[in-house]
Image (spheres, grey):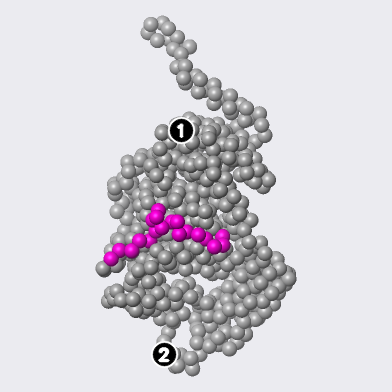
Amino acid sequence: MPRNRSGRFLTLPLIGLTFFWLTFANLSAISAQQSADTLVLCSETLRPALGEWLEYRRSQGHRVVVQTAHSTPHKNRRLIAGAAKTMGIRSVVIVGDSGDAWLNPKSLVPTDYVLAKVNVKYGSDPVIATDSRYADLDDDGVPELAIGRLPVDSAAELVAFTRRIITYENAAAGHWQRRINLIAGMGGFGSLVDKVIENTTKQILTDLVPPEFATTMTYGSWTSPYCPDPSKFSDVTIERFNEGCMFWVYMGHGHRYQLDNVRLPDRRVKILDTDLVSKLGCRQGSPIAVCLSCYTGAHDSHSDCLAESMLKQPRGPIAVVCGSRITMPYAMSVMSVGMMDEYFRGKCVTLGELMLNAKKRMVRVNDDSNPYRELLEALGQSFSPTPNLLDAECREHIHLIQLLGDPLLRVKRPPKLALKIKSGETSFSAGEAIELAGVAPIAGTIRIELAYQRDRFRQRPNFRQMYDPSEEAFEKIHQDYVAANDLVCIKKEIATRGGDFATSIQVPAGISGRCDLRVMLTGDQSIALDSLPVRIKRSSTSARRSGKKHVAR
């Protein structure tokens, strides 16, 4: 052993040796068991309340091991890294809140921190609160494990949330599983830049979200056809949540305890805050909430941040994807595109896998398959305040984005119906019957819709330049909002016992251009979806009668 100048042997400090021995003993005991796919890092006082969650996940085939969390991030990183090496774990579930962990270490699990390098230039905290670092085994800034946190403060909250997870994964099928509701605040980068970002986002959503999914847009600009009655914006935001959807997505500015305000010439209207979350009460299904905004996921705050407050509502979201500090448009766009691609075209089974894959794709060399990366980078170079740091911005957001929820949550991904048009034609005229056929994997009700594609309107929107605060004007704004989100021209329902089915739908008069045939099969416990693009020919008679053309968004 090496000696110091006095000739004495250098020895490890007693506390370090004790920690080494306890860690070695724990990992040796674990390695003596069979390999595991999931490590639960749990606060001491919450561990007894894990029973129902453990039984449920193990019944699904998960091999789960539970360890009591240490009081420091460094010790927890060593514990997780050791478990990954000895057991081959692929997921980490943190159980316990992180705020004020130093005040009550027995009931809370600390988060980790990394230095901010890009967003700190624009007012963010000097450090970023992140659970992602726990999943980064080789310290290269990119996680190797799926990770999520259940930010509960008590055994009662843990048991209640466990039952919500079980209910969600076994929920009855319904229209909510095909809905994606988007809420957007004003970017505030100037009218020209905001419009470019808005149009680019629409195009990406149109291309990446399959037509069989029904989307709505609620936009916090009184001049937009997607703006509801501005005085009731928060009510509409909450109703879009409560009606049930697969994803409820907010894009815009945010803070620890609230989303942005809608700015009107004569007032400001809240979108959502920690007081309004008590109104969240999803009637069927529980959305996965995605908050593409600053600070809403600051789970290390002294009191529950907005994302935590949402998650803890009895009928709130089943999980929240959120940022813990200031987020930036370019990296958030890259992240959201990666998430959409992983959900709609990937094969991940759990939400944690989806988030892990999306984060890996944030690194430029790993995302050559993303056809929108070049477009987003061009926008970033033009409008980002740090155009020379786009790659660093993406890497920073790997740490910024948190998953508050169970990373083992099963992703609901409806199967296809093998839909086809019997004639093989894709172009039709008003009055013609489109003969459809497909294969229904289950018995249930089939709903067929002929709808305009997302980048179009059924009727020309009213573009507003003069602000009128009267009740009549606000009511007209709301009517325009409803019309802008209604793309369905005609619908029909039939029953099926499963297997091959055939039906037809007649093209109504007065429509033309690019449309989609959207089909949804609803059974007792699951749904199936499919769609086909068609073009409706414009008749000379209807063109003369209407005197209008349907316009692209």
Residue 412, quarter of picture: bottom right
Range drawn in magenta: 267-285
Picture disc at residue 229: none
Q: Is residue 543 magenta?
A: no
| Residue for point 62% across, 82% down | 505
> Which residue matches tag 1?
105
Query: Relative to 460, does residue 44 appear above or below in the rendering?
Result: above
Q: Could you tell me residue 80's position as x and y percent?
A: 53, 34
Residue type, label 2 = Gly
Residue 120, quarter of picture: top left
Residue 264 is at least partly visible in this image: yes
Q: Could you tell me residue 144's position as x and y percent?
A: 52, 42
> Which residue matches tag 2?
547
Which of the pair 186/354 is nearer the observer? 186
Q: Secondary structure at mark 2?
A: loop
Q: Is residue 272 magenta?
A: yes
Label 1 packing within 10 angstroms: few (<14), some (14-19), many (20+): some
Q: Nearer the viewer, mark 1 or mark 2?
A: 1
Is 431 situated left or right of 138 in this image? right
Q: Could you tell me residue 271's position as x and y percent?
A: 38, 61
Residue 196 is at least partly visible in this image: no
Label 2 packing within 10 angstroms: few (<14), some (14-19), many (20+): few
Which of the pair 361/167 is nearer the observer? 167
Q: Residue furthest left?
A: 266
